[in-house]
Amino acid sequence: MSQDYEVFITSMKTKTGIDLSLYKEAQMKRRLTSLFQKKGYRSFREFFEKLDQDQDLLEEFLDRMTINVTEFYRNRSRWEVLENKILPRLLKENQTLKVWSSASSTGEEPYTISMILSRFMPMQQISILATDIDEGAIERAKLGIYAERSLAEMSTEDRKKHFVKDGSVYKISDVIKKPVQFKKTNLLADPFDSGYHLIVCRNVLIYFTEEAKDRLYRKFSQALAPGGVLFVGSTEQIFNPGQYGLVVEDTFFYKKM
């Protein structure tokens, strides 16, 4: 690791609490170098000096560092497993469900969960915590306004039932929004609540080092209630779930033993 980047990592951790050393170095370095060169800076040192003084640039940096690529029902077949297999079992064993969308980005994931749960229970019984490290993404999620491409995997029935088209965008209904509570959280640094029946963490862990992933799997396992499920992304299979007290319930679904 170049000294320039190493100093940048230490400075950013002090300033924001975010530890960039826990992200895969080559990917992170490439993304950030592209950003600072585009802005006309020549080094990480020069870039940090500007970040330290310019709040707008700092927010843009945080936005670039977090990867907000998401859509409703992303990898739809996995959501069908959640709806047809995982949730019926969880609801048979629990009267209410404690649910956490742990990297909620711009809201598509927690709102997808809300739509699915609405088929099983009255909306007033549903409570979903949605967290992300990026405050800008959280603010966009709270608005609940989406471009058509975000709805590509959604059924026509769901689109009609839960959205109102307004010009070229779609607004999600207040009924689906209401059960979702948003909160800023740094997964690697902040403590987790416990007793969750479902934790969804998809398409985030691929950006972390093996050490960071190991730490997160342990934290997620501790946050789950017995019989609770961790639902991960389609590139994030856990190869030895037993070491975290988890067993495979279906592909990309891990049950707490």
Image (cartoon, rainbow, N blue to C red):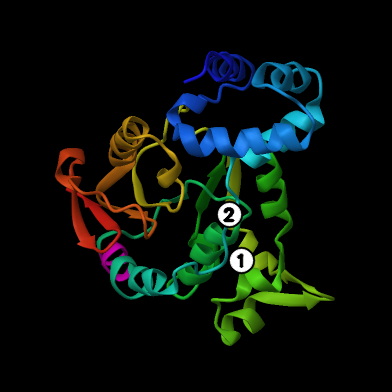
Magenta extent: 88-92
Q: Residue 244 placed where, x, y %?
A: 21, 39
The residue at 49%/60% (across/down) is 126
Q: Residue 206 placed where, x, y %?
A: 41, 46
Residue 86 in view, yes or no:
yes
Inter-mark Cα distance, 1 to 2? 8 Å
Query: Is 99 above or below relative to 88?
Result: above
The residue at 33%/34% (across/down) is 219
Q: Secondary structure at mark 2?
A: strand
Residue 199 is a magenta residue:
no
Residue 218: mark in rendering: none
* Front one among 208 and 146: 208
Q: Which residue is mark 2?
A: 180
Q: Residues within 10 Å of mark 2 (few under 14, many from 20)?
A: many
Quadrant location of residue 59?
top right
Kindly indicate whether the residue at mark 2 contacts the one at mark 1 (C-beta within 8 angstroms).
yes
| Magenta stretch, overall SS | helix
* Front one among 36 and 98: 36
Q: Secondary structure at mark 1?
A: helix
Residue 187 in view, yes or no:
no
Q: Residue 12 placed where, x, y %?
A: 61, 20
Compared across the picture, whether 128 is left or right of 183 comes to left
Amino acid marked by disc 2: Val
Q: Which residue is mark 1?
A: 176
The residue at 63%/59% (across/down) is 178
The residue at 62%/22% (across/down) is 16
